[in-house]
Amino acid sequence: MIKILIVEDDFLFSNFLECELNKLNKYHIIKIAKTVTEALNNISNLKPDVAVVDIKLQGQGTGIDLALLLSDYNIPVIFMTNSVEKAVYDDSQS
C-alpha cells in the first residue's frame, strides 16, 4: 500500500479525501496534518510515500513551502487548492 500524508486545514474536505482514497484499497492514509509544522513534526516517524498538500494552509507557511522542505526527504507532492486567486498559481510556478 502507498502511504499518504494529507496536509489540509479543512476538516470536511480532508475527511472526504481520506474516505475516497481508502475506497480504492491501494492507499493508506497515515496522517492528516492541518499545518506545515504538524506535517514536518511527523515526517521522520511516518515516512510517507507521497504527500497530498493544500496550497493555502493555516499558520506559518504554505503548501508550496512544505513541498520545498519535503523535497529534502525525496517525498513527492500532489498539490490541491480550491483557490481561484491568480497569485496562488503564480506562486506555485516559482
Image: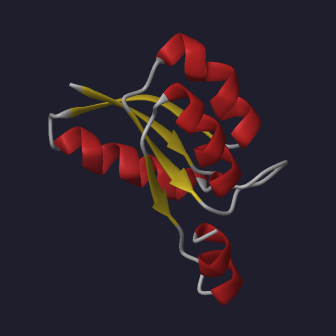
- Tell me where residue 70 sits by quadrant: top right
**Which quarter of the figure has residue 49?**
top left
Residue 38 occupies quadrant: top right
Apparent side of residue 40 relative to residue 48 in the rendered image (left or right): right
Total marks shown come to 0
**Residue under the image location 59 percent in, 78 percent down:** 89
Which residue in the rendered view is the most extreme toward the right?
60
18 lies left or right of 32: left
Q: For the view shown, which residue lies furthest in the top direction?
A: 45
Q: Quadrant of the C terminus?
A: bottom right
Q: Residue at x 68, y 63 (%)?
A: 56
The image shows residue 71 at horizontal and vertical percentages of 54, 37
Compared to residue 48, the image places residue 54 above or below, namely: below
Residue in the picture at 27% in, 50% down? 20
In the displayed structure, does residue 53 sit left or right of residue 94?
left
| Horizontal and vertical percent position of residue 48 | 43, 26
Quadrant containing the N terminus in the rendered view: top left
Q: How is the image coloured?
A: secondary structure
x%, y% of residue 74? Answer: 46, 31
Residue 85 seen anywhere in this rendered image of the structure: no
Which of the two residues, 36 or 94, is positioned nearer the viewer here?
94
From what the image shows, is residue 23 above or below residue 12? above
Query: Observer-nearest residue: 61 or 7?
Result: 61
- Image position, residue 11 (x, y; %): 58, 51
Residue at left offset 58%, top offset 30%:
72
Q: Quick check: 5 above or below 41?
A: below
Q: Can see residue 23?
A: yes
